[in-house]
Image: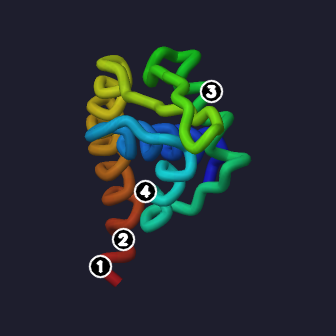
Amino acid sequence: MDIQMKRGLLDVCVLTALRSEESYGYQIIKDVKPYVEISESTLYPILRRLESAELISVRTVEHNGRLRKYYRITPAGLERIKAFKEEWREIMLIYKFVTKEEENE
């Protein structure tokens, strides 16, 4: 898969994991694991990128004597999910066109 496409898909997966409630890194990994494999070394750069783009906000809380970052989706993040769904409809139309001949075989 094209690296840029995969990067965009992972961004939307992380945003979707935060859609209903704020969460922290390890929980986000667990939430997306049934759908896509993601490691900590992949997740944290995504979170920093999403924060820089103001698609998520971050707050730090002490938890069991350690600091834990909690991530929350912003209205712009919700709009990104909405835009992704619209883009995906177009991708699915292209996919149907590309596989059309295979269906007739």
Q: Residues within 10 Å of mark 4 (few under 14, many from 20)?
A: some
Query: Circles 3 and 1: CB distance less than 8 Å?
Result: no
Mark 2 — residue? 101
Query: Circles 2 and 4: CB distance less than 8 Å?
Result: no
At label 1, the amino acid type is: Asn
Where does residue 27 sit, x and y in percent of width and height? 48, 52
Separation of disc 2 and disc 3 at Cα?
A: 42 Å
Q: Residue furthest bottom?
A: 105
Q: How many dots with numbers?
A: 4
Q: Which label was assigned to residue 91?
A: none
Q: Residue furthest right?
A: 41
Q: Secondary structure at mark 3?
A: helix
Q: Residue at x 31, y 41 (%)?
A: 90
Mark 4 — residue? 31
Separation of disc 4 and disc 1 at Cα?
A: 38 Å
Separation of disc 3 and disc 1 at Cα?
A: 46 Å
Give the answer, above or below, for where 50 lies relative to 36. above
Q: Residues within 10 Å of mark 1 (few under 14, many from 20)?
A: few
Q: Secondary structure at mark 4?
A: helix
Separation of disc 2 and disc 1 at Cα?
A: 5 Å
Which of the two discs, 2 and 3, sits closer to the camera?
A: 3
Give the answer, above or below, for where 74 lies relative to 21. above
Q: Secondary structure at mark 2?
A: helix
At label 2, the amino acid type is: Glu
Mark 1 — residue? 104
At label 3, the amino acid type is: Arg
